[in-house]
Amino acid sequence: MKIERPRGTRDFLPEEMEKRRELEKIFREVAELFGYREIQTPTFEHLELFTIKSGEEIIKEIYAFKDKGGRDLALRPELTAPVMRMFVNECSHLPKPLRFYYFSNCFRYERPQKGRYREFWQFGAELIGSNSPEAEAEVILLSYRMLERAGVNFELSIGDVNLLRYVLRDIPEKEAAMRLIDKEEFEALKRLLAKYDMVEIYETILQFREIKNVEEAEEVIDYDFSHLKKICEILDELGLRYFVDFTVARGLDYYTGTVFEYYAEGLGAQKQVCGGGSYRLAKLFGGEDVPGTGFAIGFDRVMELFVKSPKYEPPVVVVSLVESKEAFKIAERFRENGVKVVVDVMGRSMKKQMSFANDISAEYAVIIGKKELESGVFSVKDLVTGKQKSVSFEEAVELIKSKGRIDEE
RNA sequence: GCCCGGAUGGGGUAGUGGUUAUCCUCUGGGACUGUGGAUCCCAGGAGCCGGGUUCGAAUCCCGGUCCGGGCCCCA
């Protein structure tokens, strides 16, 4: 009986893994260029951390369990809460702003589908200590550059939950209305608002749908847009492409203002590749009321769109006709000189060893027989040209490292 | 949690209520014991799981699991 992978999990073979590392490297480089430093938090936390942030009803979407001491724990379903917990626990005294980035797996108990898995990876960043327009512009810029470098074709929408709260200030069911706006279920929204005789608010929200920038918004509603305007000024100056979209909403009330989302084509129903915004979470977790701004990129979704594939360098094959310990010694000499080599561990004939070298697309074979062992020379065969020559060890290393071709015997 | 569609060697597939389940690829070995790629030969390896119908099920039916797509959700 074969043991299957748990539902919604994946195995990554070398080729896929190399591609993932390549994308990860790009994200890291960009984050570090912005002065962000990597952190890591535990894979599991107290369940409470997540219920405080998101409410009891999220338990059904979480891998929650009791440990042997009866503690209620949960595999992290996201990273903002753990990062803010860490901040409150041990970083409150550090000079602000703090710039952190992370790349970790998260777990959610949901129905898997394209771009959605039960174990998935998030690459994110948090700027802690400020939610000024500059802080928010920086975080948006960082996420923008990361997705850009990854070659993703995306659309960026920037919204303001404060504006929505302002508009909905007299509605008893604010949260529900917010959700409907986020989901763009305007008919249901209309019914909800009609209940409270607030249809004119509905008209205002409908007008929001048409808005593409702050100037247009100012004509629709009397509201202080200076914060958002400042962000837009910076982003415009840098040539970023985005839409102001006030229907970008969040159901939870620790979001304080600016929120943004990135969408990409080609992912089916799961087309959001990144989401972010400003929040006040530190206080919820028992710390001072320090604001933060951050985002999380759905790493696996970006992977679906990430085409660049690093070229795999096959190893040099040491083809041995002598005792294996001699082959091991020679392989070690090459490795000490930075040359990636493999030796036969299958007890194969020379012919088979050559054939294996060919199968893995090796460019060079180093042949070690009695002759070579006695004379101390190395027979290097260029598997691209098919030509071979006898050289010293140093010459062999030099040739292989420079990827030189052997054109004649 | 809901709806739809799938599942045959490691990968890709054919077929059919009835002998030993097709072909390609792959992997290992050999032809060929100091030289790869070509060719040929041999070997390995499969009907998701459980139940039902039937003389007989991989095939039909039901349930489950997993995968894909959509909904819900998306902190």
Image: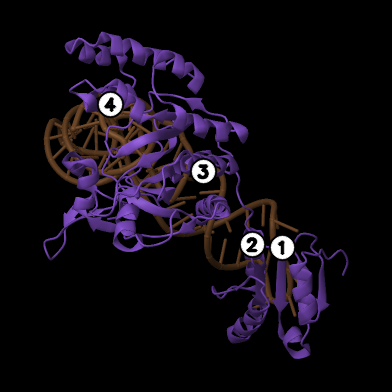
Chain colours: A purple, B brown
Residue A162 placed where, x, y %?
34, 30
3D distance between C-alphas at marks 3 and 2? 41 Å
Contact (Cβ within 8 Å) of mark 3 with mark 2: no
Report the disc number at residue A179: 4
Question: Which subunit holds the residue at mark 2?
Answer: A
Q: Given the image, on which type of amino acid does mark 2 rest?
A: Pro
Q: Which chain carries label 4?
A: A
Give how far across and how far down residue A44 sits, in percent: 27, 58
Task: Give the mark toward the camera: 4 or 1.
Answer: 4
Q: What element carries label 4?
A: helix
Q: Mark 3 points at which residue?
A: A138
Out of B23 and A391, give the one closest to the viewer. Answer: A391
Q: Where is residue A150 in the image (x, y as percent from the top left)?
A: 57, 43
Mark 1: secondary structure: loop
Tell me: residue A277, above or below residue A78: above
- Label drawn at residue A363: 1
How far apart are the two marked residues, 3 and 1, measured between alpha carbons?
A: 46 Å
Q: Quadrant of the C terminus of chain A?
A: bottom right
Structural distance between the alpha carbons of marks 4 and 1: 58 Å
Q: Image quarter for residue A234?
A: top right
Q: Mark 3 lies on which chain?
A: A
User: Quick one: label 3 or label 1, which is nearer the N terminus?
Assistant: 3
Q: Nearer the viewer, mark 3 or mark 2?
A: 3
Please tell me how crowded label 3 is: few (under 14), some (14-19), or many (20+) other residues with Cα within 10 Å. Answer: some
Q: Nearer the viewer, residue A7 or A129?
A: A129
